Amino acid sequence: MGRLPAEWEPQSGVQLTWPHCDTEWYELDKVLDCYVDIAYNILRFEPLMIVTRDIEECRSDIVRIASAKGYDMPWDKIRFYQAPLNDTWARDHGGISCYGASGEKYLYDFVFNGWGLKFASDLDNQITKTIFHQDAFNDDVIGVDMRPYVLEGGSIDTDGCGTLLTTTECLCSVNRNEYLSKEEIEEELMGAFGLERILWLDHGTIIGDDTDSHVDILARFCSQDTIAYMQCTDADDPHYGPLSAMEEQLRGFRTLDGKPYRLVPLPLPEPLYLGDYRLPASYANFLIVNGGVLLPGTGSPLDEVVRMRLQEVFPDREVVVIDCRALLSGHGSLHCVTMQFPEGYIR
């Protein structure tokens, strides 16, 4: 049995998979601008791994945009790796780190099939293996190909002590692992990650989400006894019913020692649209890094409300708001485009 580390544990760096003109982004210039903001703020706290189809093209993007913003990029903390790619959602095609029973460093490479065969993913499914063979990871990191099992990093969250938080809608959806029962899926996860239990959320959705309710847009562990979650208080909003049902279920969850969780509600962002399409904005899609928390902003006064709320939850980390509205056009946000690796994993 091993252990799946929590996101707040010490990290060796974060992966970004870099957009280009053939990725499915609306207004690519704004997306690249946002990626440079994310890269710069990650680098304030820890090293950065960038996977790109063309290293020189990527460097050129960063130099041009960073110069315009006045960013002094610490190039010695960036490692570039080249791979063909369909899209740029590192959270879901990236390797998942897990410790073995004796502390071995495993890198699990689960199947990524474009969120249940919704989008092309043949290239993205190969990225982790490709960069592993380019020596992106330290020599003691063991690359592991699991049996054919579909799992995206955004669909799970952990307290690092044997509890996994996930959603029934995603993990039990068609075109992922429909040949397995819920009990068989649970057995697979328990064995892979050395879990003691799984907390299944049966409710909760964000309109515009393509992932079948990834947990990282709904509810997140902030510590072993604290969960931040999306809350809707407007009874006329279509989110009200699903998120209220999720809130009630969270209230019924208990820590391993039988205590109620400290629940931290995060307000639903003000509605954002692309034409008539409501975009899946969520403040739960934050990234925890060494000494910091990067929060996806929406350009609303609510950004500061959430920043202050999370600052209370993470008193020893700096909570930084990054305007991520450009990413919403791709139906994701900050946590979705990043993947962290624990201490000792990446070079």
Image: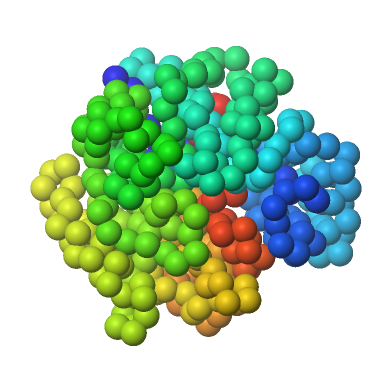
Q: Residue at x 42, y 73 (%)?
A: 268
- Picture quarter with the C terminus: top right
Q: How is the image coloured?
A: rainbow
Q: Is residue 296 left or right of residue 283?
A: right
Q: Residue at x 68, y 40 (%)?
A: 86
Rendered location of residue 207, percent (x, y): 45, 67
Where, quadrant-wise, is the N terminus in this rendering? top left
The answer to whether residue 300 shows anywhere in this view is yes
The residue under the point 25% across, 47% down is 200
Most foreground residue, 119 or 252? 119
Relative to residue 75, is residue 189 depicted above or below? above
Query: Residue 108's spot in the image, x, y percent?
Result: 48, 25
Quadrant of residue 122 within the rendered picture: top right
Front-most of residues 329 and 58 = 329
Farthest residue, direction left: 258
**How many labels sit on residues?**
0
Task: Relative to 173, say whether 137 is above or below.
Answer: above
* 20 horizontally vs 266: left or right: right
**Residue 334, above or below 134:** below
Nearer-the-camera pick, 94 or 245: 245
Q: Residue 318: percent from the left, percent from the top? A: 52, 60
Whether 179 is drawn above or below 114: the answer is above
The residue shown at (55%, 57%) is 332
Q: Position of residue 195 (x, y in %)?
A: 27, 31
Q: Is there any visible trace of residue 291 in the rendered image?
A: no
